Image: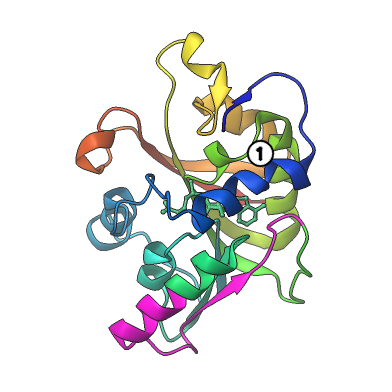
């Protein structure tokens, strides 16, 4: 199923794309591992994770949420699809990672009740591009709502567009840095950007890792 990038969509109808993918086991975006750029940011560039609570919206099978969890940082992997959530939970259990470190929940990113202390970090990968472009302003506003002041949004920008024609249909909806600035600048400051970040082999040249600080 593919949508024109222009115009608006009804979110509930649009979300059916994702249920269909999971129901038919068509998850071609899944690389089966943590994103190399995220691993590099934490393990090689030593970007310090906060204590508190973090979230990975559109977590799929949950590799990145499991990677970010630590005893002082409880991670929530959120996905619309109950199949994604049960698969991620099973993987977590197979790896022997306790549920007090990371839990997976069936949640719509735009609709869940925000915890009182909000989140101190979020990781967004293959989620911004999964949303229809008409949902991007709400995406930026929602991160501002769920992240506490001083919290960070790690956004791995993907897939970067090489031409305007690339941007006509999706998902994935191809994107550029300006698309993030348009919807984040009101509440976030870009504090880190690395166009040379490590990538999955097939994604070289179309990924750039960024970190945004909630004002
Ligand atoms: C392209 S997949 C990426 C999954 C994962 N991040 C990965 O890289 O393997 C997008 C995921 O976002 C989920 N999703 C889409 N809209 C969502 C929403 N509004 N709230 C939560 N999850 C959503 C889909 O079910 C799907 O698992």
Percent position (x, y) of residue 144?
72, 52
The correct choice, above or below, for 60 with respect to 94 in the image is: above
Please count the marks in the image.
1
Label 1 CB less than 8 angstroms from ligand 1 = no
Would residue 187 be seen by someone viewing this image from the given angle? no
Q: What residue is shown at x 77% (from left), y 47% (from top)?
A: 12
Q: Image height check: is 86 above or below 98?
A: above
Identify the residue at image location x=50%, y=25%.
Answer: 176
Please indicate whether residue 175 sits to the left or right of residue 182 in the image.
Answer: left
Q: Quadrant of the N terminus?
A: top right
Q: Which residue is mark 1?
A: 184
User: Residue 136: image x %, image y %?
Assistant: 68, 36
Q: Quadrant of residue 17?
A: top right
What is the quadrant of residue 2 in the picture?
top right
The answer to if 4 sits in the magenta stretch is no
Q: Residue at x 50, y 75 (%)?
A: 86
Residue ID at (80%, 38%): 10
**Left or right: 212, with 30 as reference point:** right
| Residue 9 at x, y percent in the picture | 76, 32
Q: Nearer the viewer, residue 56 or 95?
A: 95
Image: magenta residue range: 88-110
Query: Secondary structure under badge 1?
Result: helix
């Amino acid at each position: 199923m593919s949508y024109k990038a222009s115009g608006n969509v009804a979110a509930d109808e649009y979300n059916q794309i994702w249920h269909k993918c999971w129901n038919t086991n068509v998850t071609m975006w899944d690389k089966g591992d943590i994103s190399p750029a995220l691993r590099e940011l934490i393990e090689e560039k030593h970007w310090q994770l906060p204590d508190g609570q973090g979230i990975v919206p559109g977590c799929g099978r949950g590799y990145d949420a499991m990677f970010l969890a630590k005893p002082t940082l409880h991670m929530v992997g959120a996905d619309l699809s109950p199949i994604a959530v049960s698969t991620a939970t099973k993987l977590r259990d197979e790896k022997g990672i306790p549920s007090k470190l990371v839990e997976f929940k069936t949640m719509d990113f735009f609709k869940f009740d925000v915890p009182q202390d909000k989140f101190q970090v979020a990781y967004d990968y293959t989620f911004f591009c999964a949303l229809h472009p008409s949902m991007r302003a709400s995406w930026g506003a929602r991160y501002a709502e769920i992240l506490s002041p001083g919290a960070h949004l790690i956004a791995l920008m993907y897939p970067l567009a090489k031409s305007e024609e690339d941007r006509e249909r999706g998902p994935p909806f191809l994107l550029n840095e300006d698309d993030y600035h348009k919807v984040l600048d009101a509440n976030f400051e870009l504090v880190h950007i690395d166009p040379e970040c490590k990538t999955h082999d097939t994604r070289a040249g179309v990924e750039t890792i960024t970190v945004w600080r909630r004002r």
